[in-house]
Amino acid sequence: MAGGAFQTSREIFGHSIWKNIVEFRLFFLIYGNAVFSEEGVKIDESLTLQRGQWLRSTRKIQEDLEYIENRQVKQYSTSTINRAIKSLSHVKVQMLCTKTHELGTVFTVVNYEQYQGFGGYRNMELGTQLGTVAKQSRNNNKNVKKEKNLKDLISCIFDHWMSKDLVKHRVLTPQINLQIKYKLNHYSEEEMIQAISSYDAILNNPDYKLNTRWGLLDFLEKGHFEKFLPDRDPYTFYPKVVNDLVPQKQSKLSKNKELLRGKGGGGHAAGTSQVSSFQSSGSLPKPN
């Protein structure tokens, strides 16, 4: 692993993961190895890790988290690690965001600055000697932290979209970034993620009458997003296809075509002949 050091806030001891050994070790492994540089680190032409991100495969994480029990070196199973990743990435916890890359999994530590607690430590070091300058510095730190947290949220929402079977985007464009930022002023991150998940579930379910594949920008910009919010009950809004009615409609249509072409059954043909005969003679047939 890389050398160096990192600091963290003591608030981590009051966090729920403090009671979960696997999640705690996994989170600190990712958080401690995440990129610190503001400029990021370029891995290859297709991937540049940003501040607060780390690239690692599940197999390597197994090795990283090896532990000793009864004098034996053991590893967590891949299923155990994947469950911990899923738990830390859950919308109600949202400590991590993940996206798949050909080189491994890119982990993003949400609120990276908050866990480090840089703002508080800086202010303590400054003390009261700087007066107004210190106050301005605190405000600037808060603004930077807020912008960084917002950037993480936008990245997580975009990555969630890209993880679904929806229209793919090569990059997070400024237009998409702006739309996500605008929506976050009105809706929570959890609501946005749930809306994307609902759209994916309905779009890719043949039982629902929805076959329009919007890109993320159109989905957010043109009023489609709101239809998939949890309180709008999208699974009721979009009706289901009633498959058993389709064959009946087709059979009636075929039957009508046959009648029009004179290809009906013998009973129909005889009935038609009698009607024509009656109309031509102008009188009813005599009884036997």
Image (spheres, rainbow, N blue to C red):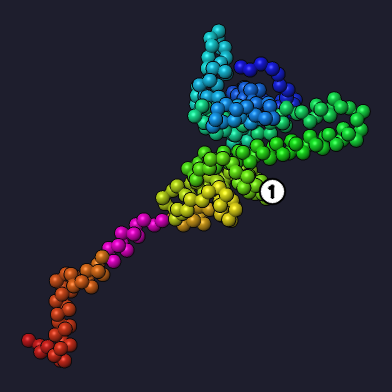
Q: Compare residues 64 and 176 and report the one nearer the observer.
A: 176
Does the magenta-highlighted stretch encompass residue 244? Answer: yes
Does the magenta-highlighted stretch encompass residue 242? Answer: yes
Residue sitting farthest toward the left: 288
Q: Is residue 127 visible?
A: yes
Q: Compare residues 111 and 249 and report the one nearer the observer.
A: 111
Is residue 42 found left or right of 117 in the rendered image?
Answer: left
The stretch in magenta equals: 241-253
The amino acid sitting under disc 1 is Asn
- Quadrant showing the N terminus: top right
The answer to whether 83 is drawn above or below residue 65 in the figure is below
Is residue 65 found left or right of 123 in the rendered image?
Answer: left
Q: Is residue 83 visible?
A: no
Which quadrant of the figure has residue 18?
A: top right
Is residue 256 found left or right of 117 in the rendered image?
Answer: left
Residue at 64% from the left image edge and 25% from the top image edge: 34
- Quadrant showing the C terminus: bottom left
Q: Position of residue 49 (x, y in %)?
A: 61, 29
Residue at 57% from the left image edge and 33% from the top image edge: 98
Q: Position of residue 241 (x, y in %)?
A: 41, 56
Q: Position of residue 102 (x, y in %)?
A: 49, 29
> Mark 1 highlights which residue?
185
The answer to whether 71 is drawn above or below residue 196 in the figure is above
Which quadrant of the figure has residue 92?
A: top right
Q: Position of residue 65 (x, y in %)?
A: 57, 18
